[in-house]
Amino acid sequence: LLPVLGIVAFKDVAASYADNVIFLFAGGTVIGIALERHGISEHFVHWMLKAAGTRPAFVVGALFMAAASVSAFVSNTATTVLMLPLATGVAAGAVALPNTAPERAARGARNFTAAALLAIAFGSTVGGAATLIGSPPNAIAANYLRAEGVNMDFGAWARFGVPIALAMCPVAILAIVRMLPAHGIALPPRRREDLPPIRPAGWATLAIFVAAVFVWVTSSSWPAGWKPAGLTDGGVAIGAAILLMVLPAR
């Protein structure tokens, strides 16, 4: 509408959508969709829960860390949608410990359900701040910083975003566990057979994801001549997205 109404020329409007961060976020979103579609994110969450064991507090912590880790590369909303069925499924399997009063076990189960849902919500938010592609507002902040003369690419954001997110994780987990103690219950152990196997397309997706993150994080320190002069973080993201579109997947 802006060009049609004569407010701004079309080339000026289009230039706003051709920013490097827009392409970085678009390519990163395609990578996130592929990780979800081929079950990589779900397998990662499964491994985290399996490592946590059956103690409610540990499971809440695992849910939080899994949500934060996935949300660093997948949108906060998509991460929450992915993990909600897993969390409610784990909560539904809670059983009372031997010699525990029914009222105490019921209260513990209610608290655990609430704690699990809050862990996903806050974990997704904390993880979304860790990387430049973790949440759309990050791109807006990066554009503002660059306009003010601050170099802000994927690696520069991660250098302060990841430590801050890591520092927030234990504080938030401790607050949730202390405010919603889940006493008197235990949770069933996770079983490997609950998940479908990772297909070749899934392994290819994982390889492309790891390669893209490696280039994003390390390219700023590569020796002169190793990195093409015109290759930006957005270019890496679009290159990864093109590979995901080209490689066969059933």
Image: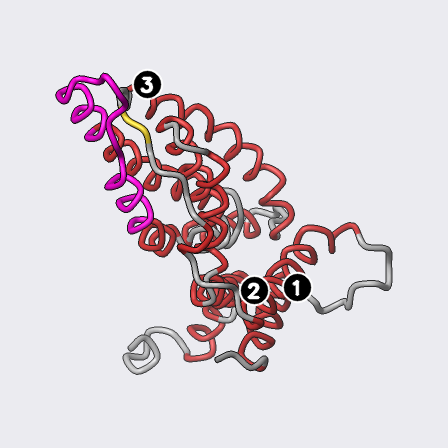
Identify residue type, mark 3: Arg
Task: Characterize the magenta stretch by its predominant secondary structure.
Answer: helix
Residue extending furthest right?
Answer: 224
Task: Residue under label 1, please give it.
Answer: 232
Q: Position of residue 8 (x, y in %)?
A: 38, 74
Kind of residue at disc 2: Asn
* Viewer-proximal residue among 189 and 177: 189
Please check the rendered image and state whether residue 222 is part of the magenta-colored stretch, yes or no: no
- Describe residue 17's horizontal placement relative to residue 103 as left or right: right
Q: What is the C-alpha distance between the residues marked 1 and 3? A: 44 Å
The residues tagged by marks 1 and 2 sit, at their Cα atoms, a distance apart of 7 Å
**Mark 2, residue position:** 20
Q: Is residue 95 magenta?
A: yes
The x and y percentages for residue 96 are: 24, 27
Q: Which residue is mark 3?
A: 178
- Which region shows up in magenta? 84-110
Residue at point 60% right, 76% down? 243
Image position, residue 174 (x, y; %): 40, 22
Badge 1 marks a residue whose secondary structure is loop
Displayed quadrant of residue 182 = top left
**Res. 233 image quadrant:** bottom right
Residues at circles 1 and 2 in contact by the CB criterion of under 8 Å: yes
> The residue under label 1 is which amino acid type?
Thr
